Amino acid sequence: MIYGKRFFYFFMFSEELQNKIIKYYQNYYKSCGLRDFKLRAENKLREEAVEEKRLLRLEEFLLLKKLQAKECFIMGAGTGGLAVVLKEKYNINVSGCEPDIVALDILKEKLKQKGIDDVGFTADFGEHLTSFKSSFFDLVYCYTVLEHVQNVEKCLAEMIRITKPGASVYVNTPNYGFPEERHYKIRWPFPPAYLPRAFSYLYLILRGKPPKFFKSLNLLTKRRLSKILSRHKNIKTKPLSPVKSSTQELLLKKLA
């Protein structure tokens, strides 16, 4: 039975798929020690609405209205909310990678129920996008993914490789030189990037948070990311976020 917040979602996806989405995100939020993990998982049923709102803010920067029938690659495509909105609202052809098999299964089922082609989505890791051609995509979109990858430099190199000359890579990732942690929903008494990880683990334990998830994160600061990007002479970097911010938001234009 569909009820409450899930009623409007009934018209988008099957109840079986909704249950898969909720189970997936309950496990994710529990791994971050969030007590309201059930509510947050339910809210993920509105993922498409959240993605649409985010894209409205970025429309001008990403030239979304000019990308009709063109190609967008989503790095770490998750459970597919962004892919659905890009195709349905902007008529942009979508491809991407998502190495989490459970998330990829949800994404593909969403696209199937929406009548959207899912052939361009693979389980490739971002460091090895061997399924995708060089200089092919009109936009590469990477939202809160770099902090999770195995090798930041290789992922950035691959994203730049598959981007067409003159096109852009959009990057949004936390700034760990700032005392805030998005995944655990806490503020640190210190920027975690500048102290031994053992201090961060201890602080998380004292706050009643499981430190296992934190161990997998890349603690990217603005300085570190800027240093990596400076090695790529074929891009022009445009910051979109304030200098002092918990977020690093960048537009990387690939030069001809």
Image: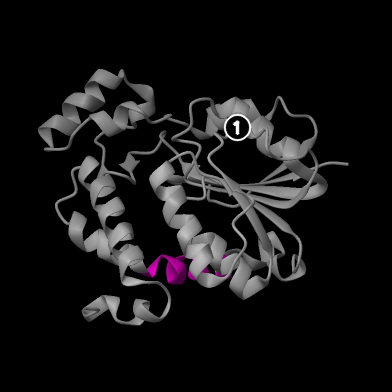
* Magenta span of residues: 46-56
Residue 1, quarter of picture: bottom left
Asked which colour scheme the image uses, the reply is one colour
The reply, left or right, for residue 199 in relation to residue 18 is left
The answer to whether residue 88 is above or below residue 231 is: below
Q: Position of residue 54 (x, y in %)?
A: 51, 65
* Residue 49 forms part of the magenta stretch: yes
Q: Position of residue 78 (x, y in %)?
A: 46, 50
Task: Give the camera-side residue of 183 and 11.
Answer: 11
Q: Residues within 10 Å of mark 1 (few under 14, many from 20)?
A: many
Query: Magenta span: helix, strand or loop, mainly?
Result: helix
Task: Give the camera-side residue of 225 and 7.
Answer: 7
At a point 68% along the width and 71% down the height, the residue shown is 91
The reply, left or right, for residue 240 in relation to residue 216 is right
Answer whether residue 92 is visible to the viewer in this image: yes
As helix, strand or loop, the secondary structure at mark 1 comes to helix
Amino acid type for the residue under numbered disc 1: Cys
Q: Position of residue 207 (x, y in %)?
A: 13, 37
The answer to whether residue 161 is above or below residue 23 is: above
Read off the residue under disc 1: 155
Answer whether residue 185 is visible to the viewer in this image: no
Residue 153, quarter of picture: top right
Total labels drawn? 1
Residue 83, quarter of picture: bottom right
Image quadrant holding the C terminus, namely top right
The reply, left or right, for residue 135 in relation to residue 49 is right
At a point 35% along the width and 79% down the height, the residue shown is 10
Task: Give the camera-side residue of 121 and 112.
Answer: 112
* Residue 16 forms part of the magenta stretch: no
